[in-house]
Image: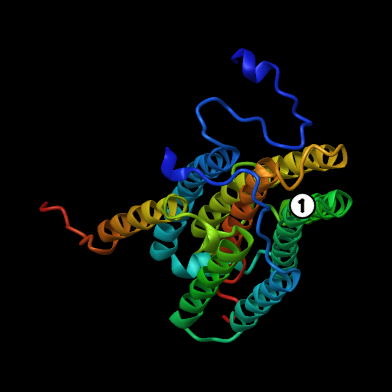
Amino acid sequence: MSALSTSSNAKPRTMPVRHYLWVLAALLALLALSAGSSLFKLGMLNSILNFGVSIAKTLLVMAVFMHETEARSLTRIASALGFVWLAILITLSLTDFLTRVPVPPPW
Amino acid sequence: MNAHAADVNWNAKSAPLEEQYDDAGQQRVAATLGMWVFLATEVLFFGVLFASYTIFRMLYPDGFAAASRHTDMVLGTAETAVLLTSSCLIALGVRAVKLDQNRLAAGLLACTAGLGLAFLVMHGFEYHKEYTEHLIPGVDFVQHGPYARAVELFFCLYYCITGFHSLHVAIGVAAILVLVVRVRHGSFGSQRYTTPELVALYWHLVDIVWIFVYPLIYLVGRSG
């Protein structure tokens, strides 16, 4: 566990307030983008755009509010694990449903 | 609980050091890592519901688009803005704790809890509206037309996802209110901020879950 050891009395590092406020502004702008774009008929692009905006918002929250940019590698791996397993779950589920071919009964 | 833990003064300015750790920094890193492992299980908890949603939406795209149009997009957007703002406030609250600004920290955390409560109240209004529109499967569900079954399926998932999410918000609000009291009593500071940081991580995850819920529930088929 010595690899995790850190100086206990070091003053904690903090980010300037304006960084948090800029991220909040970006999050609200992305929210406006997803809400506004959903009112236009873009077909599949609506879903792709919404998903992309959700990922962008998540990365902003994780990077700045959850301090992932300052986290150790082990913590970063742990934080990514849940999302990786979820991606595997959804991908494998979809490979089943997307490749099903209706087989008519032989009688 | 060992004798050491029983003698711990929880209002001490520095974190009590458990015997298995070399120093407070190492203890903090281990606690954060443990919290992230817990959050990974939470991601998978909601992930199962998201996977179900993905499959059924793929099977019934038009029905889900019709169902989504029954939800209140304005209220959903306001709820999202409220949660995003609350995430920023709790991050600023933890920052204030780290800088020994306890009064400011307590205020920011109280505002976060207030926004969480506002989210729950808005969601209550939504549920009430859906009740009056007979959109509660198994209790009072009246829909006709070719998409009736798909709409019912959508609302089953809607109540599961938003219901469990609201439960998480309520737990988060309770945890933050406890934090407010402890911060006001001076239990935390620049040498002891792990608990506020862990509660904030939980709150941010609740926010992240909603970031994905919002487009899936409120924005489908809005242009149709």
Q: Quadrant of the N terminus of chain B?
A: top right
Q: How are the colours assigned in the image?
A: rainbow
- The quarter of the displayed image where residue B176 is located: top right
The vertical placement of B3 against A56, above or below, is above
Secondary structure at numbered mark 1: helix
The vertical placement of B73 against B15, above or below, is below
Amino acid carrying label 1: it is: Gly
The vertical placement of A42 against A92, above or below, is below
Q: Is residue B133 left or right of residue B147?
A: right
Percent x, y of residue B221: 55, 75
Q: Residue at x 64, y 77 (%)?
A: A35
Percent x, y of residue A68: 53, 60
Query: Badge 1: how crowded within 10 Å, few (<14), some, or many (20+)?
Result: many
Q: Nearer the viewer, residue B217 or B93?
A: B93
Q: Quadrant of the C terminus of chain B?
A: bottom right
**Residue holding disc 1:** B116
Q: Residue at x 77, y 54 (%)?
A: B99
Q: Is residue A1 left or right of residue B133?
A: left
Q: Nearer the viewer, residue B120 or B188?
A: B188
